[in-house]
Amino acid sequence: MRSFRCSFLLLLSACEVLFGAQMRREEEEEERQRLTSEESSWGSLWPLPRLVKLSGDSFALTSAFTIEHGPGSYAGASCSILQNAFRRYFEYILRYPKGQDSSRTTYDGEQTSQLQVIIISYDPECDNYPSVDSDESYELKVAAPVSVLKANKVWGVLRGLETFSQLVYEGDCGTLFINKTEIIDFPRFSYRGILLDTSRHYIPLKTIFMNLEAMAFNKFNVLHWHIVDDQSFPYQSITFPNLSFKGSYQPYTHIYTPTDVRMVIDYARTRGIRVIPEFDSPGHTDSWGKGQENLLTPCYSGGHQNGAYGPINPVLNTTYDFMINFFKEIGNVFPDGYIHLGGDEVDFSCWKSNPDVKKFMLEHHFGDDFRKLESYYIQNILDIVSSFNKGYIVWQEVFDNGVKIKQDTIVEVWKEANLNEEIYNVTAAGFTTIVAAPWYLDLISYAQDWQKYYKAELLNFNGTEEQKKLVIGGEACLWGEFVDATNLTPRLWPRASAVAERLWSSKEVTSISDAYIRLDKHRCRMLRRGIPAEPLYVGYCEQESGY
Amino acid sequence: MRSFRCSFLLLLSACEVLFGAQMRREEEEEERQRLTSEESSWGSLWPLPRLVKLSGDSFALTSAFTIEHGPGSYAGASCSILQNAFRRYFEYILRYPKGQDSSRTTYDGEQTSQLQVIIISYDPECDNYPSVDSDESYELKVAAPVSVLKANKVWGVLRGLETFSQLVYEGDCGTLFINKTEIIDFPRFSYRGILLDTSRHYIPLKTIFMNLEAMAFNKFNVLHWHIVDDQSFPYQSITFPNLSFKGSYQPYTHIYTPTDVRMVIDYARTRGIRVIPEFDSPGHTDSWGKGQENLLTPCYSGGHQNGAYGPINPVLNTTYDFMINFFKEIGNVFPDGYIHLGGDEVDFSCWKSNPDVKKFMLEHHFGDDFRKLESYYIQNILDIVSSFNKGYIVWQEVFDNGVKIKQDTIVEVWKEANLNEEIYNVTAAGFTTIVAAPWYLDLISYAQDWQKYYKAELLNFNGTEEQKKLVIGGEACLWGEFVDATNLTPRLWPRASAVAERLWSSKEVTSISDAYIRLDKHRCRMLRRGIPAEPLYVGYCEQESGY
């Protein structure tokens, strides 16, 4: 049996609104209206596109509907990333709700029977990996009998297909509808990431794939893969197999083989998502020491080694020999232009205890300033990684401690204290910045914390326009101390969706009440598509899911 | 490929310890030892039995192993609750880890090839429902070639089978072992509940079943089914079908039919779990009003009805006519001896606004004290429920407000403020008490909050021995504002397991470090058995699971 309620009735008959300053002025009245009707003028769009013209005219979408390469497109059947996306979104659109796609072949009213996808630039980038410069813009016109999605690159098509799929709703008797719509869309920030931590707990591939899919539903474009840390080293290195053999939780089941890594990168690429691995050092490296002798600093007490180990040993040449070979491999395995090199939270106590380190400090005239030793180490690592033609991202301490970093380095700000001041300083020094501080999603609390994430704003610091351009985005971090495959997905979604809209949509899109209505529907859509996204508050979805 | 590590090697060769006062004195040394070896002297037992004698002698458990009715048992093949349990635990024991049960037929050492289950009382209660007086005690002797589990009733057998299954561990090469053991066990508290809320969100049957199974793994024995509330009325009443037809989130999919309810009760019974439904009134009843006219109090402003409704209308005879018929049905549908009648958080503002209510107050000489009106209403409801030979449980407000309640009423204390004082007062008045206050598991926080739940102690109030006997247990409440099928199970487990041990095991079992080690293994066991219980902290399970 099924509901005769119509959950996605977009009551938009008189609604043709452009986003911009005037939106603000009408907001109060609109919100009152929305809260009464429990409908948003923007349906279930999430994140909200930059420029939307929605009409009340609706077209049916029958089972004859297809997604095709349109006339004049520079991409065709050989563009497998698009073929793959067409098939994926065809499924999501037509299988709404799951398993109820019968009797939709006939409909008397107007129909849109085709979505034509047209790449208008000479190079669609069909076989590229997404990058920091990828063009994700697109234009969408929903009309009868044919709708058109135009983009410069495949990346814009991926985003536009998601938007198109979000416009489809179910009418009475199960017929699918889509309203006449014009959308011009592009992201506000080019870096929109999710950090997953696979060291504190091993996360099975299946879970990583599921979350990459959810990222695509939210137009995220970077998986920051915090792949190793103190607790375990699941990355199976080709050059140094002992790292995972001895450093993982379980050397056969709790690792990522080269094939696994390849699959994650491919799965992400087909959704326009970059994979940036993080190999954090010199701290957070306990697990590295298990499979690589003499890599960590031996700690001393009372003049003798005490059996404990500290950060990477920065005084041995063998350390840098290892790092050259290791990062050469990483540079080959991960196609992205950037590697995250960490550099956070280095504890100096072990270095301080070690006589070889003290001798080295003396020889290098570092005095008692262990930050100089840290800088020395990091400088070496950055030079190594640069030599493999990779850019790098570092945590803010590297900047704060005055390490000499290349001008194209990306600094990631994660400390909440003095956040705006830090963003000011990093950008004043001319560095590109990404911000994680407001979005540590592992720090759970009771009630609707998505609102807190939604209200965060990256460009409220007191800098010049030039400085603000250096803030290229941010990321939601789900650190893994208390997270594994059992709870990762519902803990991440839809809380990370709040971050997604903040990073994609206009700065002016700030209404919590409107966001609530759209996000509630968006989370039900994620559920329908197999993502166990948790509820925002009381209520229900037509199709419940999960376990 | 599989691990060659042996995850459950119980290093117990010199360990024969009885629980009791001497345990305390040895605790410090033991804890040091445990933290080093990351093993508990008590293996992975959870909740810890009352009296355990573990030996280092181990017996193999081959695929020839069976669970049988032993000689002289008063139960046999016709006792379906036991047959069902034998099959269930046979699966859990032999399928450890899942799908690796081959090559275990031969083993040269000593074996325990049979677990004989012997019911020693004349009435095993095979066809009963569990009740507040059910005898859950059992004695277990693990020996070669035959182990014996003795109990007075089937309920003790269910608990003992769980304990037996927790003693089994995997040796090298996949052989299963169990150590020579003697256990005498019985619960500290007879009421050990979990509250699930199916009104704020609809919880599918599958999820309820999964959590009943997890409850059995933790020796919980009451499902407090908070089935309806303001937000929705999913209980499909036979007498008043409009209640769910109009009051549920979705009248065909988001309801519990009579068959559904029956299945939940049966599923629970076979695991020794009572199902106590809560029909909370007069507050928390918004959803009731949708399908039953004139049941709620119309609110007034400016001398006119304002369209809003308040609590159940206590001044109409039709209210009580309805309640008689409604609770007559509930009494028949739910076999347990108790119904939870709620009675919490009644907002008087609507009653105050209503002229009919005011008139009624005058006629009954209630003055301005609306608590008297509330008491009047609740008194009527309690009398109705009593007339159907049911006992009742009420939230503490009913006691606090001085409602005249029968001496066998159970008062549930849920307010954290002045908790010990409240327990003192309720028991001093001679009422049986259950305590939920320390265990509101919906109030999530970062990090290991299970420790807070574990440290709670119900009998620290300053009462007489007689008063303390009136505290029959407590329950973990997972209110549903932010919980549905996507996140319920990992949010509940293993956090509720901490409550389980507190309610079952000796008061002296308080070591957090020992509990951590056992609970960590217990959560991995729940994972293996299909319950996506979230991690306590960093680490891993041999078999990860979930999504």
Image (tube, coloured by chain):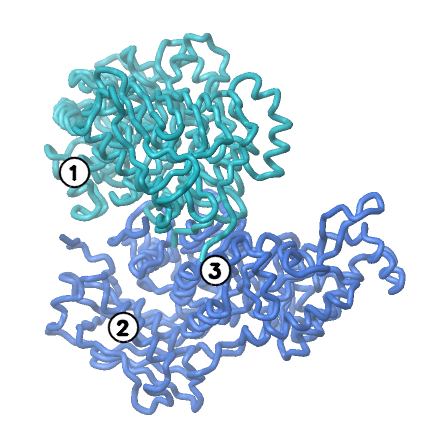
Chain colours: A cyan, B blue
- Give the letter of the chain under mark 2: B
Query: Mark 3 and mark 1, same subunit?
Result: no
Residue shown at the point (17%, 46%) measured from the top left: A251
Residues at marks 3 and 1, CA–CA distance in whole angstroms = 40 Å
Q: Earlier in the sequence, mark 2 or mark 3?
A: 2
Q: Secondary structure at mark 1?
A: loop
Query: Mark 2 and mark 3, same subunit?
Result: yes
Circle 2 or circle 3, nearest the eye: 2
* Vertical side of A154 occupied by B234: above or below: below
Who is closer to the viewer here, B27 or A453? A453
Q: Which percent across, then down, holds residue A342?
A: 29, 26
**Label 1 crowd bin: few (<14), some (14–19), many (20+), radius 10 Å:** many
Q: Secondary structure at mark 2?
A: helix
Q: Is residue A318 visible?
A: no
Residue shown at the point (82%, 47%) measured from the top left: B304
Q: Which percent across, then down, holds residue A193?
A: 35, 28
Q: Which percent across, then down, holds residue B154?
A: 41, 80
Circle 1 or circle 2, nearest the eye: 2
Residue A236, numbered label:
1
**Amino acid carrying mark 1 in the image:** Gln
* Vertical side of A231 occupied by B253: above or below: below
Q: Secondary structure at mark 3?
A: helix
**Amino acid carrying mark 2 in the image:** Phe
Q: Are marks 2 and 3 in contact (CB under 8 Å)?
A: no
Who is closer to the viewer here, B196 or B316? B316
Query: Mark 1 and mark 2, same subunit?
Result: no
Residue at label 3?
B499
Q: Are marks 3 and 1 in contact (CB under 8 Å)?
A: no
**Amino acid carrying mark 3 in the image:** Val
